[in-house]
Image (cartoon, helix red, strand yellow):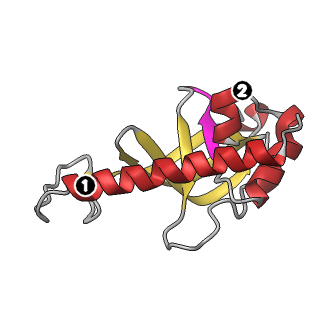
């Protein structure tokens, strides 16, 4: 699937705008630095809820193309790689729940797609720390490998 450079740039500008607005709203609504901890989840100083370690079986997708066009799989691989190289953060579409886990890094400036881009359009087994805020779920990938249902049932 081919897209014009203007279309891709428009999607990137839209995503950056969403992040800027969300950050501004978050800063405006940020309460005092009081945090509470529960036995199942904890909140970091940034307010994100850490859901803990998780294993996810799902497909590596470009979330913008998946949301807008339903694009995924081997047929969308070339476009996905081009978008990722242009700065699009990839995601994992969980097979069991159809939830999207945006790739995140522990340190700002690190490439969240590193190691995962090699599996674009493929089903993978991802292990990592999962976080949630405002309806968005993110995973800090600790390991990723190709997933095979036959291999998993052994």
In what element is the residue under mark 2?
A: helix
Query: Is residue 1 left or right of 128 when viewed as pictured?
Result: right
- Residue 65, relative to residue 17: is it above or below? above
> Gap in Å between the C-alphas at discs 1 and 2?
35 Å
| Residue 27, image quadrant | bottom left
Magenta residues span 90-96
Residue 95 among those drawn in magenta: yes
Of the numbered discs in the image, which one, if any, rests on residue 118?
none
Viewer-closest of 78 and 18: 18
Residue 41 among those drawn in magenta: no
The residue at the point 79 percent across, 40 percent down is 121
Residue 12 appears in the rendering: yes
The residue at the point 64 percent across, 53 percent down is 89
Query: Is residue 80 left or right of 17 when viewed as pictured?
Result: right
Q: Which residue is mark 1?
A: 42
Q: Residue furthest front?
A: 6
Viewer-closest of 13 and 23: 13
**Quadrant in which the N terminus appears:** top right
Number of callouts: 2
The residue at the point 75 percent across, 41 percent down is 7
Q: Which residue is mark 2?
A: 69
Please name which of the two marks, 1 or 2, marks the residue nearer to the observer: 2
The residue at the point 84 percent across, 42 percent down is 4
Viewer-closest of 54 and 105: 105
Residue neighbourhood size for the residue with mark 1, other residues' Cα within 10 Å, grouped as few (<14), some (14–19), many (≥20): some
């Amino acid at each position: 699937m081919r897209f014009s450079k203007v279309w891709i740039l428009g999607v990137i500008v839209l995503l950056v705008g969403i992040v800027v607005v969300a950050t501004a709203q978050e800063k405006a609504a940020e309460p005092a630095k009081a945090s509470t901890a529960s036995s199942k989840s904890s909140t970091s100083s940034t307010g994100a809820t850490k859901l803990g370690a998780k294993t996810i079986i799902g497909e590596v997708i470009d979330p913008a193309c998946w949301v807008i066009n339903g694009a995924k799989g081997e047929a969308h691989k070339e476009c996905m790689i081009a978008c990722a190289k242009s700065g699009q953060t990839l995601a994992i579409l969980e097979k069991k729940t159809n939830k999207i886990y945006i790739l995140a890094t522990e340190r700002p400036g690190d490439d969240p797609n590193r190691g995962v881009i090699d599996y674009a359009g493929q089903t993978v087994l991802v292990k990592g720390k999962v976080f949630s805020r405002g309806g968005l779920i993110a995973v800090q990938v600790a390991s990723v490998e190709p997933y095979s249902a036959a291999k998993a049932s052994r």
